[in-house]
Image (cartoon, helix red, strand yellow):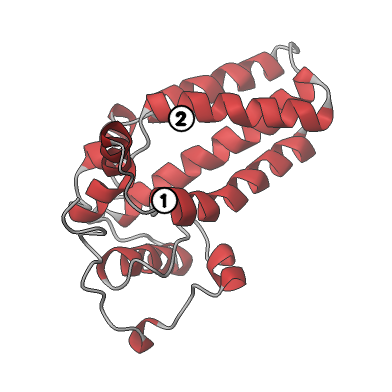
Amino acid sequence: MRRWGPPAIPFLREGSNLLLVAALLVLAGSTALGRLPFLPWLMLAGALAFFCSEYTTHRFLFHARPSTIPWLLRLQHRLHYDHHIDPARLDLLFLPPWFVVPAAGLFYLVYLVVVHDPVRALALLAGSLAALLYYEWTHYVAHTPYVPRTPWGRWIKKYHLWHHFKNEHLWYGVTNPAGDLLARTYRRVDEVERSTTVRDLYPGT
C-alpha cells in the first residue's frame, strides 16, 4: 500500500521543526482566544518575505566561500557544506534551533522597524515561520524515498535534487523556482554538465 506521505515523527524530531510547530500553535491559539487579531494579509506578506530570502540565503550565505576563521568554517560545514556531502543525513538536513531562533528574532526586529507595531510585526513573523516550516517539509520530502502525489510535488523534488547531484551553482530554490528564474540560475537539466564539486563544495576545507 502506498504511504500518504513521509513519516512525520522523524521530521518533528530533528532541527527546529517541533519548535516551529509549537510556536505556530501558540500564535494560532492566541488568535483563536482573541488575544491576537487575525491579520491574514500581513501573514501572507511575511510568508512572501521568507520565500524571497530563501533563494538569497541559500545562494549567498550557505554557499559562501569558506571562512579562514576556524569556528566560522565549522558553522558553514554544519549549516550546509556537510549537507551536500551526505544529503540523506537527517541531522544535517534541517536548520538547528541555535540558527532559527536568532534569525526569527532578526526578522521580527526588521518587521517592527517597517510597521512600527509589535502586533503587526508578530503577524508578519507568523507568516515567515509558517513558510519556514513548509520549506523544511519540502526539503525533507526531497531527501526521502517518498514519491509526492502531485505533479508539482514530484517536479519540485527533482528540481532540488538537481542542485545536489547535477550542479551546485544552479537551482537554489527549494520550494519554488522564482529566484532562479529571476537570477538566471535556472537551466534545463539536460543542458548542464555534472559538476565535479556538487557533493564536496569546497574540497580540502
| Nearer the observer, 120 or 11 | 120
Q: Residue furthest bottom?
A: 191
The residues bearing labels 2 and 1 have C-alpha atoms spaced at a distance of 17 Å
Q: Kindly tell me whether residue 160 is visible in this rendering.
A: yes
Specify the amino acid type for callout 2: Val
Image quarter where the N terminus lies is: bottom left
The dot on residue 138 is 1
Above or below, 43 relative to 18:
below
Tell me which corner region of the image, top left, top right, bottom left or bottom right, holds residue 74.
top left
The residue drawn where x is 37% and y is 50% is: 139
The dot on residue 100 is 2
The first of marks 2 and 1 along the sequence is 2
The residue drawn where x is 47% and y is 46% is: 135
Horizontal side of residue 79 vs 124, given as left or right: left
Above or below, 183 relative to 14:
below
Q: Residue furthest front?
A: 68
The residue drawn where x is 20% and y is 50% is: 205
Q: Position of residue 160 (x, y in %)?
A: 37, 63
Specify the amino acid type for callout 1: Thr
The secondary structure type at the circle numbered 1 is helix
